[in-house]
Image (spheres, rainbow, N blue to C red):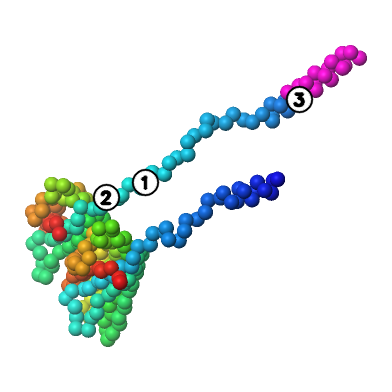
Amino acid sequence: MVCVSAVCAQDKAPQPPPAAAVKVQPSIRVTFKLMPMDANEKDVFVVSNGEFSTSREWKGDGSSFALEITGALELQPDGRLVMTFKAALHGEGPDGTGDFRVSTHLLLAPGKELEVARLGDKTLVVNFSPQQ
Amino acid sequence: MKRSVLTIAGILALGVALLTAQEAPPPQPPPTQPAQAQPEAPRALPAGNVKVTFSLAPADDGDQGLFVVSCGAYSSRRSFENDDNAHWMEVSGDLELQKDGRLLLHMTVNLHNEGDEETAEFSTTSTLLLVPGKEVEVAKFGDKNLVVNFKPL
């Protein structure tokens, strides 16, 4: 009798929600550019549906450059994107060393570029598009 | 003999009473209704992005100041260093665009300059209510004024 009760109790235990009920937001492609761009410079992009980070580093003859970006994003029901991120740019050359950082909280519209901060002689530009 | 029997009976009665008292369930709090899950209130989106510019006036050649675009918390920092000089400036704070178009800005600004012969450091923390497009001199940093303005985007 006790065993039967235990089995009944197990049958009534709360079940995890079906997988379809778990809300997963779509992936977003976020692009970061340092403007104006040098001749052989490329933009940085990352595809994510939550937290993200990306970095690049370059070292050459007497110079070095490093860019690091971390953040998190959340797509809104109206198609806009709430994003928090930090960007750090570091450069070393014969004239000295420069270090530039920004941390901010943005509300972005899809496809619309936004100049976010001045990092040295560059302007950091951000935009995003939903990933197909 | 009769007294002993009565004593034993009394002890037994007391023991039964104690056992009964121990076995009695402790008073339970009145049953409460299970809490109904409340729908989660949607988080209010920020009013929009604004561009805040921090500059030093009069500006040195090529110094355009710092700007940051945000709809909430922000920080930005720049530093230069070479064999002769070092400079860094950092701004941080929080902003809130008001319904009337003005901006409530909390800010902390630190400035550091090092040269061959001297070092200077300045700092200010303030809360401002700014009108779009209108520059405000916020603090004196040595021979320069810290100037702040913003525009909604």
Contact (CB < 8 A) between labels 3 and 1? no
**In the picture provided, is A52 more to the left or to the right than A4?**
left
Contact? badges 3 and 2 (CB < 8 Å): no
The disc, 3 or 2, on the residue closer to the chain's N-terminal end is 3
Question: Residue A24 appears at what percent x and percent y?
Answer: 38, 62
Q: Position of residue A111 (x, y in %)?
A: 21, 68
Residue B16: mark in rendering: 3
Same chain letter for marks 3 and 1: yes
Percent across and percent down for residue B21 are 69, 26
The chain containing the residue under callout 3 comes to: B
Q: Is residue A69 visible?
A: no
Give, as a three-letter code, the residue at label 2. Ala
Disc 2 designates what residue?
A: B44
The chain containing the residue under callout 1 comes to B
Please give the name of the residue rendered at 54% of the width and 31% of the height, measured from the top-left corner.
B29
Residue type highlighted by circle 1: Pro
Amino acid found under the numbered disc labelled 3? Val
Q: Quadrant of residue B149?
A: bottom left
Crowdedness near tag 2: few (<14), some (14–19) or many (≥20) residues, C-alpha within 10 Å: few
- Along the horizontal axis of the image, is A86 left or right of B132? right
Viewer-side label of 1, 2: 1
Q: Residue at x 11, y 70 (%)?
A: B62
Residue at 80% from the left image edge and 18% from the top image edge: B10
N-terminal-most mark, 1 or 2: 1
Q: Chain of mark 2?
A: B
In space, the residues marked 1 and 2 are separated at their CA atoms by 15 Å
Q: For the residues tagged 3 and 2, is the chain the same?
A: yes
Magenta residue span? B1-17
Q: Which mark is residue B39?
A: 1
Disc 1 is placed on an element classified as: loop
